Image (cartoon, rainbow, N blue to C red):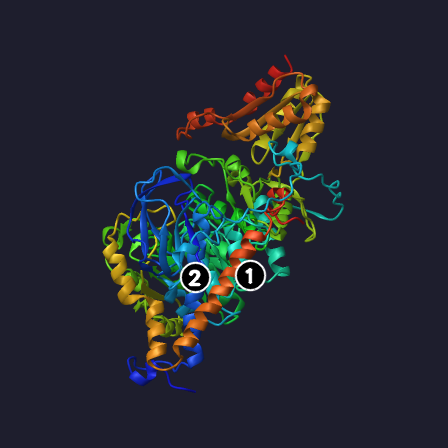
Amino acid sequence: MATQILMPALSPTMTEGTIARWLKKEGDTVSSGDVLAEIETDKATMELEAVDEGVLGKIIVNAGGEAVAVNTPIAVIVAEGEDASTAGAAPAKPAEAKQAPAEAKPQAATSSSAPAAKSLPPEPDYTGEMITQTVREALRDAIAEEMRTDERIFLMGEEVAEYEGAYKVSQGLLEEFGAKRVVDTPITEHGFAGLGVGAAMAGLRPIVEFMTFNFAMQAMDHIINSAAKTRYMSGGQMSCPIVFRGPNGAAVGVAAQHSQDYSSWYGHIPGLKVVAPYSGADAKGLLKAAIRDPNPVIVLENELLYGKTFDVPKSADFTVPIGKAKIERVGKDVTIVSYSLMVGVALQAAEKLAEEGIDAEVINLRTIRPIDVETIAASIKKTNRIVSVEEGWAFAGIGSEIAAIAMEHAFDWLDAPVTRVCGEDVPMPYARNLEALYLPSVERVTQAVKAVCYR
Amino acid sequence: MAKTAVARQGKRAGANELSPEQLKQFLKDMLLIRRFEEKAGQLYGMGLIYGFCHLYIGQEAVVVGMQAAAEPGKDSVVTSYRDHGHMLACGMDPKGVMAELTGRRTGYSRGKGGSMHMFSTEKKFYGGHGIVAAQVPIGTGLGFAHKYNNDGGVSMAYYGDGAANQGQVYESFNMASLWKLPVVYVIENNRYGMGTSVARASAGDLHKRGAAYGITNEEVDGMDVLAVYEAGQRALSHARSGKGPYILGVNTYRYRGHSMSDPAKYRSREEVSKIRSEQDPIDRIRQMILDDGIATEDEVKKIDADVKAVVTEAAEFAQQSAEPELSELYTDVLVEA
């Protein structure tokens, strides 16, 4: 049977080509893989290979033929012994791509908006026993409680086992769970992040500790390309249930390479969930929720909070829903929205402001992605003013997202421009006085709040 | 069981006895990949496949030999973006693979992954990874899971000579050897990382690069499916027995460009045709089957015809299936609770 050879598309951008020369002539026998012709594309000269065997029955477009559109017949291959005059029969017409029926683009209106958390039911009030413990202990309990219930969960990272954690978060875990489930890794972030992803794809539930998130930049490709995109790229067939956790943001006196807030980096990525606890209850509840979540979750802890003491629910059933912010202080005049360590700064600022007659509402985001648009918008509709507070840089930061949410969801309620209090737009300096100047302070927050209150 | 050409000729000490059926299966499996890839190239030329499309033509003996040595349903596989051959060798449906290439809803990833991103948890094929060498730590993690679950499985992590220069490969070697993980690293050295020859990119011998980590290695003729099969058996049994990882440096050759838009000016046509005419892995096994009277010319032709029919059916399926629903854009980002 005669088969037409069409001008092929030899690159993603090629629409037409020129036949530089034919390497076979009419009547030549060809077999699969033989180079038939050289074709000049928009990028280069490429070789056209035969796909089937047969005889080059007829050359339709001779050498030198210019601007031949893709899919134009250029030659005919016939079976051995077949008459070339039947050439032209059996056009190898490219099959029409079947289009899915046109339909309205669903959810188009939301496609440019923030990745909002689905409306969640009200968080149940915890009425059980409370214990006073540090954030460090709350995190340890979260890991231990979950590991007791699910054999697939294991903790890996640098110094997590024998050293019991560079920041002592994993105290006692090696003793309780053994070296199979509490795994000391070499200093090899890219490698163990990828290894964790592979283990998660195979059905385990890894908790990967980064000694700090600064080092996770070495592992960024696996967190984003390998973990976050798997579910989508597989059409929902495969998921990657993994937790990446560790301290994020500035500690004290460790300078530029060890002092960075990555919230907006991870918050940018569809396919990830990102949480940033402030209190001990947040830490325990969010980490437990992250471990139970079937998706990759980034848990951004804070070194300076590890030693802080809070009242924490004792129950092993307690979790904090991912995607739900918490109103830490109810107020009516202005909203201050923050996360992690800076919630403490926001709360101190609110107390200061109260002395001056400004009643501030403080929202602890707890989850960066998906962000709790409902709670933020409801608060703006009550106070008509909002100030965001974060350690990270302003440009494309979490505060910028808050500003967008305010415009998209509460524009008509705003009585003042949204204001961002952020880390200064420089790498973190070392000297005490410069470091303090870099970070958002109670003073900077109160100033920003007074400005939006026109006071 | 009939003795094979290999055993009869005594070319390899300790060669496994292969039945005529197994030898014919090798031919069939390699032909399926070759015809599938030729068809994919054809559909690309017709504009039905677009973007990146990396063909495996020339390298068929590597994955066919390895997978024949593996235990289906037990061992897991991960590879790079040159992945169509691996999927077929793992037993994935050619229709679903081709339909993914044409971006249709019936593709393995429902049209959201394309040539480089397909998965089958059922066949223990874990992708399909587009970032050079990312599959190496992932494959090491699959091995970690085999050991953790004590399920007797081995992970096979395939990567190319180009990927061999990425640091994460050596991070993986270190952990795999340290923890005695059941991983077989299969270096598919097709002599070019895109347009850069191994000689211009890599110092030393790729297969020996695990030696400092204490990983056993060997070099294999990747144009000889029987040699790959035998090396695969040694490597898999080593890893399965708890002795830790194993490296196979498999020398092969890619006939086509790096991707469809590669004009391949970095090598001569003579180089390609010489390897094609002298070392082609499919010609070699076909000739052996004929010479040793394992099958007649007609039987061999029938194998080819059967394979062509499968590929034609896959191509028709891939063209007739509908594109994804537009609502699919928004699904599968997260597992919904």
Q: Amino acid at mark 2?
A: Arg
Residue in the foreground of this view, choosing between A121 and A84: A84
The residue to which callout 1 is attached is B121
The N terminus of chain B lies in quadrant: bottom left
Q: Quadrant of residue B224?
A: bottom left
The residue depicted at 46 percent of the width and 51 percent of the height is: B43
Structural crowding at the residue carrying mark 2, measured as other residues with C-alpha within 10 Å and reported as few (<14), some (14–19) or many (≥20)? many
Where residue A151 sits: x, y (%)?
59, 63
Q: Earlier in the sequence, mark 1 or mark 2?
A: 2
Rendering coords of residue B228 (x, y %): 35, 70
**Along the viewing direction, whichever of B69 and A438 lies nearer the viewer:** B69
Residue assigned mark 2: B35
Q: Residue at x 46, y 44 (%)?
A: A212
Is residue A34 found left or right of A365 in the rendered image?
left
For image coordinates 60% across by 44% down, the residue present is: A99
Which chain does tag 2 point to? B
Q: Amino acid at mark 1?
A: Thr
